[in-house]
Structures are given as structure tokens and as C-alpha cells.
Image: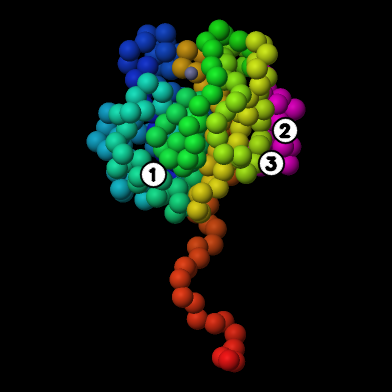
């Protein structure tokens, strides 16, 4: 059974009653709840726990980590960021959501500023599938719509994605690469844009389908593990 950890800084939920009204068990609680509908083992971890809930034992057992952060990126300890990066290179999947674009973990793995345009005006967002062959789009139609979201606009300063899966259109006119995949070492990374804390985005069935699909896509626990360095020949060779 796959092990997923949903990580959330869990700060807006403590300081903003509008957010805790939408997410009474936290954003992590809402995401964990729909992931539990799948055949996976789900745990949660939050910033204020020891080692942010990401101890060596937890990380070593995690197949896919889901990350939501916003106001407290700086409070995430560099040593934990380093360990998460190493686990991704070693094969742990990583799903980075919404304002996680500015997390230390994502920026370290991307190597760019990960900056973008933004606006909070409760705009409609239409998220178009631009790669209908991709496993992350399974079960979706051509697009999904969110009645109200924060706008993120291009240019999004990320490396050219390995695969572009979704592009968002916003009521105010901007577009955004809202679903993008990257490979780093043995690890698979999916960035997925929606999820501003004051909107009920993680209750949207399309958003839930995408995150479920992404977690399954990012799990590499059964893929081959290569040995690096000096290698014995597999066939008899004549040394010249
Ligand atoms: Zn936001």
C-alpha cells in the first residue's frame, strides 16, 4: 500500500476564522480525507510539529509527499528542506500545491525564483487539460471550472516543465501553466496551482480527482533502482 503524507503549514487555519470555517480540520485534513477514499495510507504533518512532522523515519517511509505552504515558508528549517530534496532525488514523489510555488522545497528543486503574477479578486478560473494522454488527467473532461479563485498569471519563472498537463484561464485575462511535471533524480514532481485558502477549492471533485491521479502518478516505489559507479561487464569481453 502506498504511503502518502500531506504536509501543511497550518497557519491561516489558526489565525483566520474564514479559513477555519472552510477547512475545520485544516487544508491538510481536507486533502487527507479525499485521498483516503483511494487504496492508500494517508498521514498528515504540519509546520509546528517536531521537525515539522517530517522526521527521518516519516520521510523514509513516505512514497509521495503533498505540500501546502504560504505565509511561513521561511520557518521551514533548511535541514528539513535538504532531507526532503534528498528523498525526492531518491524517488519520493512530490505534489506541490498553490502557494507552495514559493516554498523552499520547490525553489530548491527547481533552481529558479518560481515567481509569478497574482491577484485576489475571486475570479473564475477555467483549468484546461492540454495533455489528454497524461495519467493525471484520467477521468476528467476537457476542463474544470472553479467559480472563485486567486489569479496566478504568467510569466511563471520555473524551468521548462518536462510535461505541461494543465493551463488555466482567468476572468481578468491572464493565463497560467497550472499543472506541470518535473523529474529530479528518481523523483517525480507535480506542481498544481489551485487552492487559495479562502475558497473551498479542495472540495471540488475535479481538483480532488487531479490530486488523487497525481499521487498515483508520482509513486515510483516499484520502479527499478540502479547502481552507480564502476560496473562489472555482463557479457564476456575481450580486453584490448
Ligand atoms: Zn493563495
**Crowdedness of circle 1 by 10 Å Cα count: few (<14), some, many (20+)?**
many
Q: In which quarter of the image is residue 192?
A: top right
CB within 8 Å, label 2 to label 3: no
Q: Which residue range is magenta in the image?
A: 126-145
Q: Where is residue 129 in the image (x, y as percent from the top left)?
A: 71, 30
- Quadrant location of the C terminus in the rendered image: bottom right
One can see residue 32 in this view: no
- Dot 2 falls on a residue whose secondary structure is loop
Instruction: Locate residue 90, reporting x and y percent.
Output: 44, 54
The Cα–Cα distance between marks 3 and 1, rounded to whole angstroms, is 26 Å
Residue 84's label in the rendered image is 1
Image vertical order of residue 233 relative to residue 20, above or below: below
Q: Earlier in the sequence, mark 3 or mark 1?
A: 1
Identify residue for label 3: 134
Name the secondary structure under disc 1.
helix
Q: Which mark's residue is nearer the viewer, 3 or 1?
A: 1
Distance from the alpha carbon under mark 2 to that under mark 1 = 30 Å
Disc number placed over residue 8 in the picture, else none: none
Answer with the quarter of the image where residue 163 lies. Answer: top right
What residue do we see at 27% from left, 32% from top?
A: 49
Quarter of the image for residue 25 reads top left
Residue beneath the point at 42% across and 8% down = 18
Indicate left or right for 204 with 173 as reference: left
Residue occupying image coordinates x 66% and y 31%: 166
Other-residue count near label 3 (Cα within 10 Å), few / some / many at <14 / 14–19 / ≥20: some
Label 3 secondary element: loop
User: Which callout, 2 or 1, points at the residue further toward the start of the chain?
Assistant: 1
Q: Name the residue under label 2.
A: 130
- Per the model, the C-alpha gap separating discs 2 and 3 is 9 Å
Residue 137, can we see it?
Answer: yes
Amino acid at each position: 500500500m502506498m504511503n502518502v503524507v500531506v504536509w501543511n503549514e497550518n497557519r491561516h487555519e489558526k489565525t483566520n476564522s474564514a479559513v477555519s470555517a472552510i477547512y475545520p480540520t485544516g487544508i491538510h485534513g481536507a486533502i487527507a480525507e479525499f485521498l483516503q477514499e483511494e487504496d492508500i495510507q494517508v498521514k498528515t504533518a504540519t509546520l509546528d510539529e517536531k521537525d515539522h512532522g517530517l522526521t527521518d523515519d516519516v520521510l523514509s517511509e513516505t512514497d509521495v509527499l503533498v505540500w501546502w505552504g504560504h505565509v511561513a515558508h521561511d520557518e521551514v528549517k533548511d535541514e528539513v528542506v535538504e532531507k526532503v530534496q534528498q528523498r525526492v532525488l531518491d524517488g519520493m514523489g512530490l505534489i506541490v500545491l498553490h502557494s507552495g510555488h514559493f516554498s523552499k522545497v520547490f525553489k530548491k528543486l527547481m533552481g529558479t525564483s518560481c515567481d509569478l503574477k497574482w491577484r485576489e479578486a475571486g475570479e473564475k478560473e477555467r483549468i484546461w487539460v492540454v495533455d489528454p494522454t497524461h495519467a493525471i488527467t484520467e477521468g476528467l473532461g476537457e476542463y474544470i471550472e472553479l467559480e472563485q479563485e486567486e489569479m496566478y498569471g504568467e510569466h511563471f519563472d520555473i524551468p521548462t516543465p518536462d510535461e505541461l498537463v494543465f493551463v488555466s484561464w482567468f476572468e481578468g485575462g491572464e493565463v497560467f501553466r497550472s499543472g506541470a511535471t518535473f523529474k529530479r533524480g528518481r523523483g517525480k514532481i507535480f506542481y498544481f496551482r489551485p487552492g487559495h485558502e479562502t475558497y473551498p477549492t479542495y472540495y471540488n471533485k475535479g481538483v480532488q480527482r487531479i490530486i488523487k491521479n497525481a499521487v498515483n502518478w508520482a509513486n515510483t516505489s516499484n520502479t527499478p533502482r540502479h547502481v552507480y559507479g564502476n560496473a562489472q561487464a555482463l557479457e564476456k569481453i575481450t580486453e584490448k
